[in-house]
Amino acid sequence: MPIPAPALDALSALLGARLSTSGADRDLHAQSETFHRAPPPDAVAWPVSTQEASRIAAICHAHRVPMIGWGTGTSLEGQALAPQGGLVIDLTKMDRVLEIRAEDMQVSVQPGCTREALNLELRATGLFFPVDPGANASLGGMAATRASGTTAVRYGTMRDNVLALEVVLADGRVIRTGTRAAKSSAGYDLTALFVGSEGTLGIITELTLRLHGQPEEVAAAVCGFSTLEQAVECVTATIQSGIPMARIEFIDADVVRAFNRASGTQMHEGPHLMVEFHGSSASVKGDAEAFGALAAEFGGTGFDWATTPEARAALWKMRHNAYRSCLALRPGATAVVTDVCVPMSHLPAAVAAAAEDIRAEGLLGPIVGHVGDGNFHAQILVTPGDEAELAAAKRVALRMAERAIAVGGTITGEHGVGIGKRPLMPAQHGAAIGVMAAIKQALDPEGVLNPGKLVPEAD
Amino acid sequence: MPIPAPALDALSALLGARLSTSGADRDLHAQSETFHRAPPPDAVAWPVSTQEASRIAAICHAHRVPMIGWGTGTSLEGQALAPQGGLVIDLTKMDRVLEIRAEDMQVSVQPGCTREALNLELRATGLFFPVDPGANASLGGMAATRASGTTAVRYGTMRDNVLALEVVLADGRVIRTGTRAAKSSAGYDLTALFVGSEGTLGIITELTLRLHGQPEEVAAAVCGFSTLEQAVECVTATIQSGIPMARIEFIDADVVRAFNRASGTQMHEGPHLMVEFHGSSASVKGDAEAFGALAAEFGGTGFDWATTPEARAALWKMRHNAYRSCLALRPGATAVVTDVCVPMSHLPAAVAAAAEDIRAEGLLGPIVGHVGDGNFHAQILVTPGDEAELAAAKRVALRMAERAIAVGGTITGEHGVGIGKRPLMPAQHGAAIGVMAAIKQALDPEGVLNPGKLVPEAD
């Protein structure tokens, strides 16, 4: 259903040139990094203030126009697509760092500010924002999808690092959740409710984030293993031993092959762990030695230490580019990329089962993982148009999710639900889906906020 | 309104002797540790299983009978009182540790299990549950009030340490929230929604909790300061310096006087900090030295180290008994006990203003605080029946809350809302109160779950 003319007129009067219905702008906001596809939205709006975002919502609400929040478009389950048409609200013009309160280790930002832009502004303060999903995502988008990434094992996810929000509700009302205090028992935790709600309950227009002290010393290394099982069992043992890892990433042989091709490295094409330690000189040395001893027990060899900041940056850039490097293993391919998260004790079996399943289906599906918290990803390559291959890849993703549920884990550790994982929500949550639906109905009775995402249709 | 006879009959048929309408049982469940008072509930039920709790809820829901969850009755804002009558659901017979999963550092417990009982069971595992509000509260109650306490500065609050819940909803439906994975992006964070909801959205019947490794080394000490300001500024400097304190508690001169009387100690009757360090031998030594150097800068003197486990236990027992020891400063007194939490940079001024306000009102109001996260408490003594004194104490509590809001803090860091802080909720949350009310309405349309608590009446 196209946007009614009176709504378009009202939006145009409010936004002028910051409303577009051009094909180019609409197509730009129909992109997805993965195989998820949907028609372009009917229009795109670029608000510059909370007040404008609020008025946009009021107009859309009055005319029943779907609203889809947009940050950098890097979500992986089709969260920012517009399957029912409507208006994409692009928040990239609301990208300011509003206030750094270094003494409270907090910052207030607008939602379009990216994590890299924030950390650039923080450089001189001795503080940093640690959550790192790989992509240079917007902080509003990261909150909306409850993102985490390589450093969550040490610093937590967006759930742990968002203190307060400003949110525009479905009808344009503006609320503030949370406080600037480190903790609060003053009522329902609305901050936690909006974090991870993927724009289905409101549009985030401001965030207050926790900051952390830049570590005095950082050390990073890569270490090879003979088998996937040994590498993953080393991770489980490391976490159980209490070594405070800042990062501990698993990459399989296919990923290493992709790295070697893309980055010109000459790593042995077997499973590896990429690790990082943060702390004082003494603690980093001690932690690294303790990890080295454990890794040796599991057959870890060929430690390669990145001793300079430049070498570390190159190392993690390579890791962050894993998705694109793996896509390049088969030129022209797209990917079914899926993530699950399981209790640590189930991690080795879960990774091994996924790898075996990919092999049995005859697919190419590199596996990477923020395995320090039991989270791993498969990126299953599919040739566009090859429906049989796509179906096989989806079968693998489904079985990964089913196995995760069976051991008490989750169908997604950090990618979120969007379109892709929505059919699995009942299997994950059982009767609790009814509570999610009741909350959605209470806060968005007209169903205008990111319709078709996260909460399954009622039976 | 008394419980209708058909409801009582149905409850009696279900529970037999585990339903009581005796005056003694009802009075026992009308106790409050503070000045909050309400008539006793109409009846008390002791379910032994989730299934029974579910059936109780279904009966109460059908007959519009208020349901009030009860753990150990140690809440401080009247959360477990029955101002509108109804049925208290006493969960003390559901007190089992269900499953310890040491390799995943998790445990599943029933809600009536207390934190001390849990830690006793965990002793041989090398793990412990760190959240410590002082009272030996039930874990269900601690989750329901989003409790924290002395160790939150290091290990977080119940928000951070509850992974998953089983909850009986208003109408008796049973849901499970969260998973056993360390993180999840699979939909709305219902676990966080129920944690801190004070029994107004459901009755918690099972909890999955995060466990932590027992520290290799523990060191604790008390250190005196000349003025309140110096002590609190030392805390702010300590936290900003990044020393990983396990505990950092402020006690003022009145509290020390109460300790000396109650415990026979001979501490100098001035402000003190009580601190604890957890870690390896080396890190504890380093952290303690770094803190000692900082404390010296702020005039800290007379470090008294508790070097044995017994001495440490005595130290923290004294701290945990602070509430009762302070009450004993005036025999027969009850107390208006209130807590607020502010951003660290505002802590010294906030504590000083509260102390000055108490003095100006001519009240006796010892101040203690889990000041490492900006949280402090005043326990203002009032003589029962002295309405003028009660009114003055409430004025002080109100101004503490107002000043906390003014600097971006919260009206309660850990005691919760209950009856006492409910009138302050609109000032704290503004328009967000409407969202809380909508959620309450969606999940408890009949208003049977702990009515009169947390969410203010609609205008």
Image: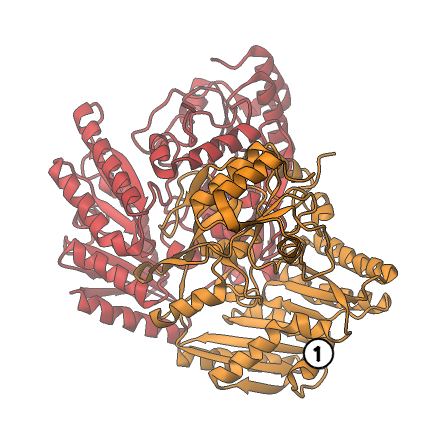
Chain colours: A orange, B red
Closest to the observer, B329 or A323: A323
The C terminus of chain A: image quadrant: top right
Q: In this view, does A130 lie to the left or right of B335?
A: right
The x and y percentages for residue B368 are 26, 48
Residue at the spot 46% in from the left edge and 54% down from the top edge: A94
In the displayed orientation, state which residue is furthest to the right: A388
The x and y percentages for residue A378 are 72, 65
**Relative to A375, is A180 above or below?**
above
In the displayed orientation, state which residue is furthest to the top: B5
**Relative to B23, is A129 above or below?**
below
Closest to the observer, A42 or B431: A42
Residue at the spot 34% in from the left edge and 31% down from the top edge: B420
The x and y percentages for residue B83 are 40, 22
Q: In this view, does B98 lie to the left or right of B385?
A: right
- The residue marked by circle 1 belongs to what chain? A
The x and y percentages for residue B372 are 32, 56
**Is residue A74 visible in this depiction of the protein?**
yes
Residue at the spot 57% in from the left edge and 76% down from the top edge: A317
**What residue does disc 1 label?**
A258
Q: Quadrant of residue A134?
A: bottom right
Closest to the observer, A442 or B352: A442
Q: Tag 1's secondary structure?
A: helix
**Is residue B168 visible in this depiction of the protein?**
no
**Relative to B258, is B398 above or below?**
above
Q: In which quarter of the image is residue A432?
A: top right
Q: Which amino acid does label 1 sit on?
A: Ala
Closest to the observer, B77 or A455: A455
The local crowd at label 1, few if under 14, some if 14 to 19, many if 20 or more residues have their Cα within 10 Å, is many
